[in-house]
Image (cartoon, rainbow, N blue to C red):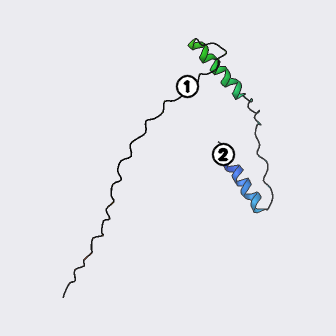
Amino acid sequence: MTDHYTEALHEVIEAKAEHRAPKPAEGEEKAPAPVVDLMAALEKSVADARERRGESAGGGEATVHEMPAKPKKKSAAKKATVKKTAAKKTTRRRTA
């Protein structure tokens, strides 16, 4: 069994050592993938979904409703902030 990857890697290394360009990779050129129109696919999907739900194909305009106003909160009295004092550090001295 032939390891084509290793052979190609050795070729690249040899070409670099000799300061020349390596041989182009051999292989089949793949045909490009077909281009998909995403907007057309989305529109078709939406139309199909509407049809399944029994809605009209035209879709119609959406209705807009005013959102109810939120009741204002009563401002609570600000709590007084108390500064905490740092605890004093004491070190014990050892006597020999």
Q: Identify the residue under disc 2.
A: 3
Q: Earlier in the sequence, mark 2 or mark 1?
A: 2
Residue 33 pos. (x, y %)? 73, 31
* Residue positioned most to the left: 96
**SS state under label 2:** loop
**SS state under label 1:** loop
Lateral position of residue 42 relative to residue 77, left or right: right
Location of the C terminus (image quadrant): bottom left
Q: Identify the residue under disc 1.
A: 65
Q: Nearer the viewer, mark 2 or mark 1?
A: 1
Identified by mark 2, the residue type is Asp
* Residue positioned most to the right: 20
Residue at x 63% of width, y 12% of height: 56
Above or below, comparing residue 35 to residue 91 in the picture: above
Residue 13 pos. (x, y %)? 72, 57
Q: Residues within 10 Å of mark 1 (few under 14, many from 20)?
A: few
Residue at x 69% of width, y 28% of height: 38
Residue 6 pos. (x, y %)? 67, 50
Residue at x 58% of width, y 13% of height: 52
Q: Residues within 10 Å of mark 2 (few under 14, many from 20)?
A: few
69 and 93: which one is in front?
69
Residue 93 pos. (x, y %)? 22, 83
